[in-house]
Image (spheres, rainbow, N blue to C red):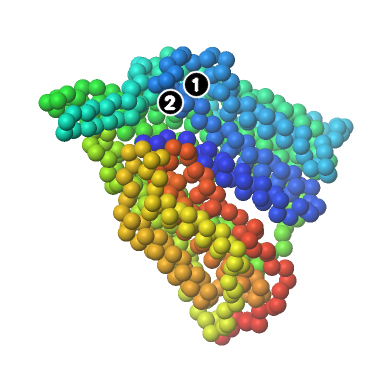
Amino acid sequence: MESLSSQFGTFAVAALIVYFLLRIYGPTNDSNLLNSARQHAFWCAIIGFFASSSSNWFSDAINVPIDEQSSLDTAVSIAVAATPGVWIAFIYIASQYTWPRKLKPLRTATLTPRSLTSPIPKKLVAALLIVLVLACVSLYSVRDVTAIAPVPELEISTDDYYSSSPSQDGLRAAGEVLPFLYASLGFLILAAVIASIVILRRKPLPGISQHNNQLLRTTWLNRLYRTVAVSIALQAGEALHYKARWFHNESSRYIDGSGAGIDYMESMSRIGGAIDSTANYAVLGVSVIMFLWQPPTNFENVAAKKRTQFSRLREQLLSLQFATATLTFVALFIAWLSLPEIDEYVMPTGERVTWMLFILTGAALFYLALNALYLGYVNAVSRQISSASKHYARLPLWPYICAGMFVVTSVYFLIFPPLDYLWGFVAPSKIVVLALVVVLISAHLGFVWFTRRANIAWEVSADEETWYRRVFELRSLRTITAAIVAMLVVGYEYPVRLDFLAVLIFLWPAVIFLERPVGGVAKSLKKSKSS
């Protein structure tokens, strides 16, 4: 089973690109100092999280390549082990000195005593220490892993039989790699301590009250400790996957021509699978808990935003996207666990790849179904305005041109894969591939048809209603495009991983294609109270 933590790099690349796009196209004229400070803290935390959790150094360190069977270089290994901690320390410290110009910290004198420990979220620190202890227990449990020698390429050829198997990397012993994993945890804690000191001793921001300055420090520390906790969980998960890999390798050591050792093989394989699942679910659980552990929001003198029908419309769209995307990724992760395992002792088939394509298609349909169910609910509660005219318009042409290029290219390589590049790959049926693509395109067309005819429950202008429906159409377009691209870059398991491309398409900001309506013609429809 593939390590869950190794997938964070995929989201890192995609999310960072999305972040820069939003910074370029997003509004920059916010005159509220507190809002600017909170936005700066939020985006720096996003960068820090993805940068620190995208390193896959341990998975590379435990491998023993067939052509380079040398011991690890101590200096280089320490440097790569320190990467997550260095990223966290650098970003959280640098962000304290890269505020927008209007937020440059000033040295001010005050008679009010200030405690350096009061902003520290003590319950979160306790949770971080619990995660650290559990991580150390996980590392201690893999101390007995022994080295496994790499296997060279094997060819068996007779007059009527030919068989070949590629070379396989070996596995380093726990005594060789665990010290660097402990060092990585130490660097993470050290980064948290140093960044905390810098945050606590930072000069207060001008134009912001002492209370709000303290809450800003608490917000920084909250996100710092949550990021460190997830990073520690990722390192512990990698250690457990390392142990599971040893069991999977051990399971094949006692097979002979008469079939002896099958029970042992199945037992070791089950243990390895259980450890893999434990690691994945533990990392997922810690990540969810830290994600839900929100920073304080009780800032004083915060001007309430003017609530309009359009603002409620936008909030509903953001909430719906967050909920449906989260449920889709969770469903995709659970379905991925049910994929058939690769049996190295039988001829390869296209069964696993075919199931991957079905799962990716199902995930896209699941996402569209969730959005359609919500629109159906809104349509049902808005029947009193069903006779009113519906305001909608097609998307600009160039989103469809971009999507078409991705779809056509992906479908071509799905049907005619480069088999010389994909060693030992068995392509799925061309009819199955085409059928799944047709299903996705049909689902998109049906979803667009429904979004243009469903009622909405907000009294907004014609331009705003049109924008609302176009956002749904764009989400559907990028979802089916991402699914078809994922069939190729994920389902066909290219040696060069391009998973981030599918994730990037799925998360591409709507603001790049659609301008938010400003003003617009007032909608003539008014809800009838008598209805």
Marks 1 and 2: in contact by CB < 8 Å? Answer: yes
Q: Spot the residue most to the right.
A: 109
Q: Secondary structure at mark 2?
A: helix
Question: In percent of the image, x 52 and y 47: which residue is there?
Answer: 501
Q: Which residue is mark 2?
A: 239
The circle on residue 52 is: none
Q: Position of residue 300 (x, y in %)?
A: 74, 48
Residue occupying the far left of the picture:
258
Please report the residue visible at 50 percent of the width from the left and 30 percent of the height from the top.
Answer: 56
* Residue shown at the point (54%, 53%) measured from the top left: 505
Residue 381 left/right relative to 398: left
Dot 1 corresponds to which residue? 181
Note whether residue 43 is visible: yes
For label 2, the crowd category at 10 Å Cα-Cα, with few meaning under 14, some 14 to 19 and many 20 or more, is many
The secondary structure type at the circle numbered 1 is: helix
Residue 24: x and y in percent read 71, 51
- Give x and y (percent) for residue 18: 62, 49
Instruction: Judge from the rendering whether residue 5 lies leftward or rightward of residue 270; answer left or right.
Output: right
Kindly identify the amino acid type of the residue bearing the numbered disc 2.
Answer: Ala
208 over 201 or under it: above or below = below
Q: Quadrant of residue 266?
A: top left
Is residue 18 depicted above or below 371 in this figure? above
Q: Residue at x 65, y 32 (%)?
A: 120
Quadrant including the C terminus: bottom right
Image side of residue 525 versus residue 453, left or right: right
